[in-house]
Image: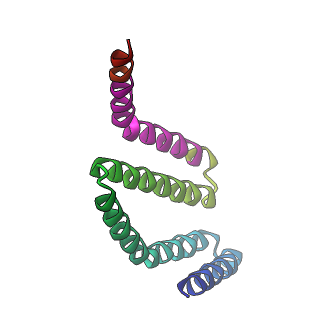
Amino acid sequence: MDIFRIAGLALLTAILSVTVRAYKPELGIHVAVSGGIVILLATISEFTGIAESAHDLMKRFGLDEGIWMLVVKVIGISYITQTASDICRDCGENALASKMEICGRIMLFSAAMPMFMKLGSSLIGLIGNIT
């Protein structure tokens, strides 16, 4: 299983980062960020398989592709925000990490706004048909 390899890489990176920080604190963060990037790159192949399966599922049930694109965008924003925030915290920049999280929340709301507008229009249409 790939998860064991990735978990091993994460643990090895953490141990190496802590060891390097003991002797060269400014290089420890570079080790941690580099390991994190390698881990993220290792999981990209998994995402492509998930994306293809979800696309097939959307086609099979006749769902709008816009919904799928929104889901992908929201998941991407969430992961990027979390990763950037964690890296900022690892660097000791807690205030910057908090600002990154606020930015991510705003971006999520912005990405979902068209869906809220569509839902509101549908509700108004349904209410108009009832009266």
- Which residue is found at the position 57% from the left and 72% from the top? 32
Whether residue 34 appears in magenta in the rendering, the answer is no
Q: Please say which color scheme the image uses.
A: rainbow
27, above or below 16, in the image:
above
Residue 115 position, x and y percent, is 36, 37
Whether residue 108 appears in magenta in the rendering, the answer is yes
- Which residue is found at the position 64% from the left and 77% from the top? 17
Q: Residue furthest front?
A: 130
Tell me the quadrant of the picture where the N terminus can be found: bottom right
- Residue 99: image quadrant is top right
125, above or below 58, in the image:
above
Residue in front for this viewpoint, 108 or 48: 48
- Which residue is found at the position 52% from the left and 59% from the top? 83
Residue in front for this viewpoint, 54 or 114: 54
Tell me the quadrant of the picture where the C terminus can be found: top left
- Residue 60: image quadrant is bottom left
Residue 104 position, x and y percent, is 48, 44
Q: Residue furthest top?
A: 131
Residues rendered magenta in the picture: 97-123
- Which residue is found at the position 57% from the left and 81% from the top? 3
Residue 89 position, x and y percent, is 62, 56
37, above or below 129, in the image:
below
Q: How many marks?
A: 0
In the image: residue 69, left or right of residue 84: left
- Residue 75: image quadrant is bottom left
Residue 108 position, x and y percent, is 44, 42
Magenta stretch: helix, strand or loop mostly: helix
In the image: residue 107, left or right of residue 101: left
In the image: residue 104, left or right of residue 16: left
